[in-house]
Amino acid sequence: MAVGLVVFVGIVALAVFFVVLRGEEQTLVPEVRGKELTQALLELQVKELYPRIHLRYSQSSRERGIILEQEPLPGTIVKAGRRIRLVVSQGVVLNRVENYIGRNIDEVRMDLLTMGAALESPLLTLREPYTYDYSPAPPGTILQQRPEAGTNISGPINLEVVVSRGPENILVTVPQIAGLELSPALELIGRTGIGFEFSLRNTHEGEQGGMVVSQNPPAGTSITANTMVSLVVNTPAVLGEHEVFNLFSYTIPRNPFPLPVYLDAVLPSEEQVRLISVEYLGGNFTIPYRLPIGSTLILSMMGREIHRETARN
């Protein structure tokens, strides 16, 4: 009886020992300073650590959402479940006009919108329409601004900018697209960034369907970057019972310079497939597609959805 009691007490003591150890698991605090808040939270979650967030204005609008300070410091060994103090930048309190020359116009626009959302009345807004000029700088780069950087902000100000269209009359060489199947043709167009316009025709005897059968201008021709290349695709001879082959068409307003455009398809299985990603100047955006009936086609520009439709016969 005494021996049994000793064994029982030993087992209980061992169980308590392991419970205590489990409750005191230790982990290493990661370095999250300089990282975006989302990334920092993911890294803390992996270490079973929890944030205590404090917001603070900083010296640059580019620091908005970035971790400025953390406590404990990286490399500190703490118990799992510990709260980590994070100081996150909420951007700047504008009192002077920043230097926006050399920055992308869309990046600056988003920064100003974000900062203005925290105020009753935005202190600095972009005056539209922008003035555009040809320049060796990448399209969308701010070349000039008024008022100049360093101007004191004592009330609401309209910021006037001159934006680069990119080099004038830049020449590109038309790639060999005729003879390619549809998917590699769309991939090549996305890489080269040429202007394009598709049309469909029936498949002739002896042809393989779903191919680019002709192009104009021909491969090797030098053209200006805004010249459209006409491409003809033949329809597949045979489709699956629940498939459709058709031409997506949507008119995108002309832009001063090419902007990133994406066409995605969400299949009935909810799988998402990207059909094309390309820098596009605007105009009639046409893409042939072969998809399951009922798929949803989603057209986006600069990450924002502008149109969707359903693939039907």
Image: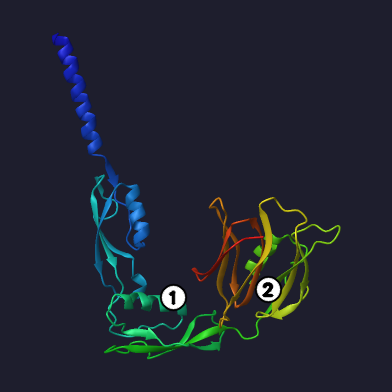
Residue sitting nearer the eye, 237 or 109 = 237
Mark 2 secondary-structure assignment:
strand
The answer to whether residue 219 shows anywhere in this view is: no
Mark 1 secondary-structure assignment:
helix
Identify the image quadrant of the C terminus.
bottom right
Residue 148 spot, x, y in % from top left: 38, 90
Identify the image quadrant of the N terminus.
top left
Residue sitting nearer the eye, 292 or 280 = 292
Check disc 2 and give the amino acid type: Phe
N-term-proximal mark, 2 vs 1: 1
Which residue appears farthest toward the top when viewing the image? 1
C-alpha gap between disc 2 and disc 1: 27 Å
- Type of colouring: rainbow
Q: Name the residue that disc number 1 marks.
A: 107
Mark 2 neighbour density, 10 Å: few (under 14) some (14–19) many (20 or more): many
Residue drawn at the location 56% of the way across and 81% of the way down = 255
279 in relation to 256, above or below? above
Residue drawn at the location 16% of the way across and 15% of the way down = 6
Residue 142 spot, x, y in % from top left: 47, 83
Residue drawn at the location 68% of the way across and 73% of the way down = 196
Residue sitting nearer the eye, 35 or 208 = 208
Residue 77 spot, x, y in % from top left: 26, 47
Q: Name the residue that disc number 2 marks.
A: 196
Residue 167 spot, x, y in % from top left: 60, 84
Mark 1 neighbour density, 10 Å: few (under 14) some (14–19) many (20 or more): few
> Is label 2 or label 1 in front?
2
Check disc 1 and give the amino acid type: Glu
State yes or no: discs 2 and 1 in contact (Cβ < 8 Å). no
